Image (cartoon, grey):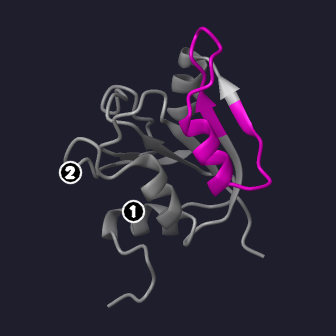
Amino acid sequence: MLKQRLIHPDILEALAAAGHGSKVLITDGNYPASTMLGDNASLVYLNLTPGFPTVTEVLRVLLTAIPVEAAAVMEPADGAEPPIFQEFREELPGLTLEKLDRYSFYEEASDLETCLQIVTGEQRIYANLLLTIGVVA
């Protein structure tokens, strides 16, 4: 029995096998997860119902288990900033969100360093967050 907040066995397994520089993608409900899955990534579906869980809810739990050194988001083509980006900044103080266009984000999120994709029920658009795992001090 685990006493920590993160208890999902598949997520724990993927994170335990990851290392510094590995990436974790938390997706909204619109992300094409099955067709954009990288060769080394595990895929976990947490999308229980529309809107639950949200990307920020999953992020909060992941942050209890891993250090994060970088974060990237998918920027809309018109350059407008979705409100969820501010929520990401609040959860990741001290980090600057790297903004990537849609196809660059897909490429980055499906590269060999991505060890885990977590699909949420998030309904807000552009709520995809790519985290880079940092070093445990």
Residue at x 55%, y 71% (from the top left corner)? 65
Going from N to C along the chain, the mark reached first, 2 or 1, is 1
Question: In the figure, residue 29 lies in which quadrant?
Answer: top left
Secondary structure under tag 1 reads helix
| Residue ID for mark 1 | 11
| Total residue callouts | 2
In what quadrant of the picture does the C terminus appear? bottom right
Q: Mark 2, mark 1: which one is toward the viewer? A: 2
Side of 100 where 34 appears, left or right = left
Side of 19 where 125 appears, left or right = left
**Residue type beneath disc 1:** Ile
Picture disc at residue 48 = 2
Residue at x 58%, y 10% (from the top left corner)? 77
| Crowd tier of the residue under label 1, counting other residues whose Cα lies within 10 Å: few below 14, some 14–19, many 20 or above | some
114 relative to 19, above or below: above
Residue at x 38%, y 49% (from the top left corner)? 54
**Residue type beneath disc 2:** Leu
Marks 2 and 1 close (CB-CB < 8 Å): no
In what quadrant of the picture does the N terminus appear? bottom left
Nearer to us in this view, 73 or 8: 73
Which span of residues is magenta-colored?
Answer: 72-98
94 relative to 5, above or below: above
